[in-house]
């Protein structure tokens, strides 16, 4: 008998990779999507029509809709990936973030109980390294104290604790994967890695002059999203419900990511200046770019409080789940994202520029 999985946040980066992964494993995959007059199903368009892929309308803010879907699907596994996932946006929309990222988790757990599935349905909660926030220890593992440092992280902390509470109070198989940053060619365009790789593609094709970033010193442990969804599944196949840190164990700065991304497009940068005055100047590459400032810092992309030192220790996931954190290296990740975006921008032409401007307005909170 094939298993049935229900994914909230199915239209996102992780939801799309997880759907592919579970379909390959022979699952019946059901996803929850929001009702909307605009199409945001780009990442799962290739799966629609698959005989084992099904979509249902629902909303993380609406318990009735969640209960109806859970009751109809009667899943063996639920992957709760839906969230307002942008840290910067959580400062602009803290209440919405709390409703979806905190109370939303509670709604999913209660939907499972309302449908009397608490003894059979396993639940994965997409938790986050942002819980470590203003870090108290480097690198961070499952025992590192939390110190959330944004409205997003505070909301996610509730999600983490309510999952733990339901596990103990009702003996439910529910677990959190504490995922460090995971990127891909499907990453949203306002997250720093994708913003960089798209800008590299556009600058190298003459469609953008300069990339504006915030804190270049910020350190992250960046992995490949496609590798991380395997771990979500492994967490639910474990013999007992436990929380796991999922990370590569390797750390780089935003500046290093930027340098490497430009290098993949044949552009060498030299960084000069400090803080808000820092600039990345082209010292080698196409003649028309040499000597030009291709990267500059803008205070628009600084956060009221920023998490600057995330570095995960995946020892437990390696030992207990047999997961390989070194499947895709940092260098391979940057390369695959840059190559993808160079091809994408080349095929989109001028339309790529419009799209980027929109992503930038969104990140800055500007309505145009
Ligand atoms: N977005 C963005 N844009 N971030 C920038 C920029 C910029 O122009 N310049 C510097 N940064 C810095 C941010 O200040 C942050 O320290 C770091 O780059 C990474 O930012 P994001 O890529 O936006 O990701 P995040 O780390 O805040 O959050 C992501 O990872 C979490 C897991 O640790 C999101 O995917 C979260 O949903 C996820 O929980």
Image (cartoon, rainbow, N blue to C red):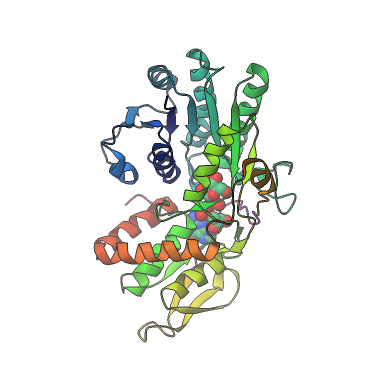
| Residue placed most toward the observer, 295 or 123 | 123
Main SS class of the magenta portion in the image? loop
Horizontal placement of 76 versus 246: left or right? left
Q: Position of residue 199 (x, y in %)?
A: 39, 66
Task: Residue at 42% x, 81% y: name it.
Answer: 292
Q: Residue furthest front?
A: 1
Q: Position of residue 257 (x, y in %)?
A: 53, 66
Task: Residue at 42% x, 50% y: name it.
Answer: 365
Q: Is residue 91 visible?
A: no
| Residue placed most toward the observer, 270 or 73 | 73
Q: Position of residue 361 (x, y in %)?
A: 38, 54
Relative to 299, is 79 above or below? above
| Residue placed most toward the observer, 315 or 64 | 315
Relative to 99, is 217 above or below? below
Q: Is residue 325 visible?
A: yes
Indicate the quadrant where residue 343 lies: bottom left
Relative to 9, is 338 above or below? below
Indicate the quadrant where residue 30 lies: top left
Horizontal placement of 7 versus 236: left or right? left
Magenta range is 296-310
- Residue 182 shown in magenta: no
Q: Position of residue 357 (x, y in %)?
A: 34, 59
Task: Residue at 55% x, 73% y: name it.
Answer: 277
Task: Residue at 45% x, 23% y: name it.
Answer: 75
How many numbered discs? Answer: 0
- Where's the N terminus, which quadrant? top left
């Amino acid at each position: 008998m094939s298993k049935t999985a229900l994914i909230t946040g199915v239209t996102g980066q992780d939801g799309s990779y997880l759907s592919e992964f579970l379909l390959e494993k022979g699952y019946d995959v059901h996803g929850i999507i929001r009702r909307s007059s605009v199409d945001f199903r780009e990442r799962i368009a290739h799966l629609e029509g698959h005989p084992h892929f099904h979509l249902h309308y629902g909303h993380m803010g609406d318990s009735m809709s969640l209960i109806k879907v859970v009751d109809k699907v009667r899943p063996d596994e639920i992957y709760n990936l839906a969230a307002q996932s942008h840290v910067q946006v959580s400062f602009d929309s803290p209440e919405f973030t709390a409703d979806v990222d905190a109370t939303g988790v509670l709604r999913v757990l209660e939907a499972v109980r309302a449908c009397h599935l608490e003894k059979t349905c396993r639940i994965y909660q997409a938790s986050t390294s942002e819980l470590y926030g203003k870090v108290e220890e480097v690198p961070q593992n499952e025992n590192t104290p939390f110190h959330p440092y944004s409205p997003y992280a505070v909301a996610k902390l509730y999600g983490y604790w309510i999952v733990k509470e339901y596990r103990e109070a009702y003996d439910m198989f529910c677990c959190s994967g504490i995922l460090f940053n995971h990127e891909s060619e499907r990453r949203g365009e306002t997250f720093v890695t994708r913003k960089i790789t798209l800008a590299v593609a556009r600058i190298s094709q003459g469609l953008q002059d300069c990339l504006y970033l915030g804190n270049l010193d910020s350190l992250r442990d960046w992995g490949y999203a496609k590798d991380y969804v395997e771990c979500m599944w492994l967490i639910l196949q474990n013999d007992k419900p436990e929380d796991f840190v999922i990370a590569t164990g390797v750390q780089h700065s935003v500046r290093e990511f930027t340098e490497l991304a430009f290098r993949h497009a044949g552009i060498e940068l030299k960084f000069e200046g400090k803080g808000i005055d820092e600039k990345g100047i082209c010292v080698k590459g196409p003649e028309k770019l040499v000597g030009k400032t291709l990267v500059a810092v803008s205070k628009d992309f600084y956060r009221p409080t920023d998490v600057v030192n995330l570095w995960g220790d995946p020892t437990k996931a390696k030992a207990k789940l047999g997961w390989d954190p070194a499947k895709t290296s940092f260098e391979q990740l940057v390369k695959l994202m840059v190559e993808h975006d160079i091809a994408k921008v080349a095929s989109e032409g001028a339309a790529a520029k419009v799209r980027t401007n929109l992503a930038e307005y969104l990140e800055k909170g500007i309505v145009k």
